[in-house]
Amino acid sequence: MGEWQEDKLQELRFLDSDRTMFMKIAKWSEELGFEYCTFAVRTPLPVSKAQTFAISNYPEDWLSSYQCNNFVSIDPVVRHSMCSQEMLVWSDNLFADVPEFWQSAKTAGLRFGLTQPTRGNHGVAGLLSLARSSDSITSSELDESKFKLAWLAQIAHQGMSKYLISDSMPATGENLSKREISVLRWIAEGKTSNDIAEILGISERTVNFHINNAVSKLGTTNRTAAAVRAALLGLL
């Protein structure tokens, strides 16, 4: 997992737009076995009219139908993502209350899929949905790839949000210390706090102190998101 993460973070350093970022996310999704990919993000403000931004390679006919019919208002995937950060595997039961919607999605080739919700700074909610036209998602497949999927969702949130809703993202990662950057680099390689403490010859408590500082400075919600954001800023 560590080597996989490091390879992906290295590739992120050369991306400079929402389109190139999304193309990379879609490519990695395909490597994990999914034909289609969507990332959407929703701002919490203004409260009376929250804004949603999305980028997708779903079939054009489906995207047009989704927008024209305002499917976002009945989509159970969206409803789940607004109140939970648990990964959601699509099923007939999930869409039982909206059978026509579900049938339309399957006809478009979105027959099997999953969604990983995310939360960013300032209450920004995101979701990464991956789908394919054949082969159900097995429990063994999930066990093998769930950490990669969750990590990919974090990358999408940190990377895509800065393009889609730049005003809601922290401006910089300036003032990170050399030690904080070093700790984040090891986190990006999949190391635990205990691992990093042994590598750097410091206490685990000190490692966590640096992690908390970095998370605060970068405006993220956890260590993984901080490592991703630091990589996107070219700090690693």
Image (cartoon, rainbow, N blue to C red):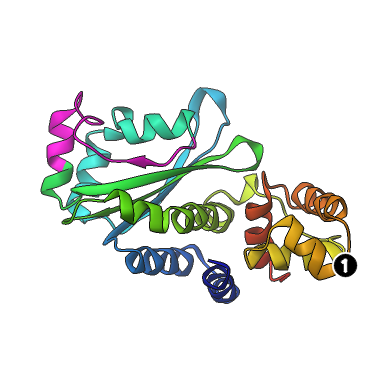
Left or right of 79? Residue 200 is right
Q: Secondary structure at mark 1?
A: loop
Q: Residue at x 41, y 58 (%)?
A: 145
Q: Is residue 79 above or below residue 229?
A: above
What residue is drawn where x is 26% and y is 55%? 58
Q: Name the image quarter holding the C terminus.
A: bottom right
Residue 94 counted in the magenta span: yes
Q: Amino acid at mark 1?
A: Gly
Name the dominant secondary structure of the magenta segment. Answer: loop
In depth, the one of 133 and 40 nearer the eye is 133
Task: Check disc 1 and report the residue beneath it.
Answer: 201
Q: Would residue 181 be seen by someone viewing this image from the given angle?
A: no
**Residue 67's spot in the image, x, y percent?**
27, 40
Relative to 64, is 101 above or below?
above
| Magenta part of the chain | 85-104
In this rendering, the count of numbered labels is 1
Crowd around label 1: few <14 · some 14–19 · many ≥20 (10 Å): few
81 left or right, relative to 100: right
The foreground one among 136 and 178 is: 136
* Image position of 170 (left or right of 2): right
Residue 63 in view here: yes
Where is residue 193? Give x, y as percent.
Answer: 74, 56
Where residue 157 appears, x then y in whole percent? 53, 51
Asked if the magenta segment contains residue 201, the reply would be: no
Residue 170 in the image: state x and y as whole percent. 71, 50
Residue at position x 65%, y 59% from top? 229
Q: Is residue 1 above or below residue 84?
A: below
Q: Nearer the viewer, residue 60 or 151?
A: 151
219 vs 48, nearest the viewer: 219
